Image (cartoon, rainbow, N blue to C red):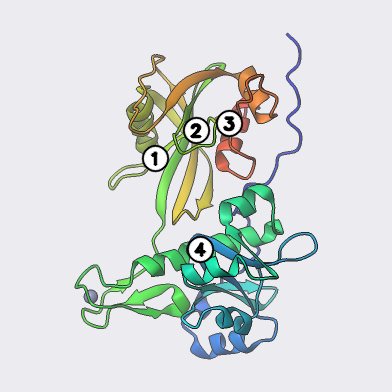
């Protein structure tokens, strides 16, 4: 048997390894926040719903604005504190979706969605984690204006990391929604599926939300059984990835398949089938004869599949 092709250096996983120091202990310190905001080195990321606003530059677009520049884009802008970069504050500024749409046609701006930025490498990789942080946090604010306990309008506190209810005194914290994403394998084959939302020819790991009262391992087994009719045994954690669409955390796992006959849940998937290791390698390398591909290297699915191919599965 010929040796398997080398997949090359392992590319970075998108939205991870943030260089920001979150400085959570400063969030309630109003004097410190005022000083951070007044620092001439303070910068912010500007987000309008799904759109990220950047400045056009000669090569990569620049997503950092001064606070004054950002607030001039939309009078109703909302600000959250993200952390410190070499001692200088980084904020997230949320502007209206309409204001962001309008900037698309303004000279000097590059306005697009975060998936495009990450997949196409439209800005320096170091900006992806703080943009993901800002996008998820601002999205939470946009969807949690009212107290789920009593219905009163809530107030932003802790520099954007909490909302307090003035009526019933409940405190509300930003939410993160755990999603398991897993590769079921059986010796030299693995199970990939296709969602109707995927671009044509892309096959990926199965995935689904973790439900209340469920462990990650149980969620992996349940989702694989529900979506593809495959029963899994041993589940091993691999890695995680923030997925700010809008506020998910992907929990990557490998799962040993105990059964082989696939029954596709067509409400969730367009298809699911077994792939050989060689076929998956050709997909990772973008050399598949029918043009089938895995997700791009910035996504955790690529890394989950690749780790299995490279024999790094517990
Ligand atoms: Zn309340």
Classify residue 17 by image quadrant: bottom right
Q: Nearer the viewer, residue 14 or 217?
A: 14
Would you call the spot at circle 2 few (<14 residues within 10 Å), some (14-19), or many (20 or more)?
Answer: many
Mark 2 vs 3, N-terminal side: 2
- Position of residue 173 measured from the top left corner of the image (x, y, whole percent): 37, 68
Q: Distance of mark 2 from mark 3, alpha carbons? A: 8 Å
Earlier sequence position, callout 4 versus callout 2? 4
| Residue for badge 3 | 305
The alpha-carbon separation of the residues under discs 1 and 4 comes to 21 Å
Q: Residues within 10 Å of mark 3 (few under 14, many from 20)?
A: many
182 relative to 60, above or below:
above
Please state the horizontal and vertical placement of residue 277, each as a whole percent of the image.
61, 19
Eye-nearest disc, 1 or 4 = 4
In contact (CB < 8 Å): disc 2 and disc 3: yes
Badge nearest the viewer, 4 or 3: 4
Q: Pointer 2: what residue? A: 205
Label 3: which secondary element: helix
Q: Residue furthest right?
A: 58
Residue 208 has which mark? Answer: 1
Please rate how many residues cluster around mark 1, counting C-alpha atoms within 10 Å: few if below 14, some from 14 to 19, many from 20: some
Do the residues under discs 4 and 2 have CB atoms within 8 angstroms? no
Task: Tell me the SS state at disc 4.
Answer: helix
Image quadrant where one finds the N terminus: top right
Tell me what residue is drawn at x 36 percent, y 29 percent: 227
Question: 202 and 22: which one is in front?
Answer: 202
Above or below for 249 versus 266: below
Q: Label 4: how many residues lie within 10 Å, few (<14), some (14-19) or many (20+)?
A: many
Q: Are marks 4 and 3 in contact (CB under 8 Å)?
A: no
Is residue 18 visible from the viewing direction of this image? no
Residue labelled with disc 4: 135
């Amino acid at each position: 048997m010929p040796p398997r092709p080398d997949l090359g250096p392992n590319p970075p996983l998108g939205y991870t390894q943030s260089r920001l120091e979150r400085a959570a202990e400063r969030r309630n310190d109003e004097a410190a926040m005022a000083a951070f905001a007044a620092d001439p080195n303070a910068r912010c990321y500007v987000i309008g719903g799904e759109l990220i606003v950047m400045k056009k530059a000669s090569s990569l677009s620049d997503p950092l604005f001064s606070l004054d520049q950002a607030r001039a884009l939309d009078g109703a802008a909302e600000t959250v504190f993200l952390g410190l970069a070499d001692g200088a504050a980084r904020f997230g500024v949320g502007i209206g979706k309409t204001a962001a749409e309008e900037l698309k046609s303004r000279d000097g701006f590059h306005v697009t969605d975060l998936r495009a930025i990450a997949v196409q490498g439209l800005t320096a990789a170091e900006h992806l984690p703080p943009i993901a942080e800002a996008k998820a946090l601002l999205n939470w604010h946009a969807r949690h204006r009212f107290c789920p306990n009593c219905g009163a309008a809530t107030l932003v506190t802790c520099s954007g990391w909490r909302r307090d209810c003035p009526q019933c005194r409940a405190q509300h914290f930003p939410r993160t929604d755990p999603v398991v994403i897993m590769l079921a394998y059986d010796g030299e084959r693995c199970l990939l599926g296709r969602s109707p939302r995927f671009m044509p020819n892309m096959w990926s790991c199965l995935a689904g939300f973790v439900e209340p009262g469920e462990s990650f391992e149980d969620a992996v087994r349940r989702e694989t059984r529900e979506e593809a009719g495959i029963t899994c045994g041993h589940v091993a954690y691999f890695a995680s990835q923030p997925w700010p669409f809008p506020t998910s955390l992907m929990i990557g796992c490998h799962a040993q398949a105990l059964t082989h006959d696939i029954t596709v849940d067509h409400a969730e998937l367009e298809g699911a089938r077994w792939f050989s290791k060689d076929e998956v390698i050709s997909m990772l390398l973008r050399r598949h004869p029918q043009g089938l591909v895995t997700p791009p290297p910035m996504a955790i699915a690529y890394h989950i599949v690749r780790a299995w191919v490279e024999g790094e599965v517990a």
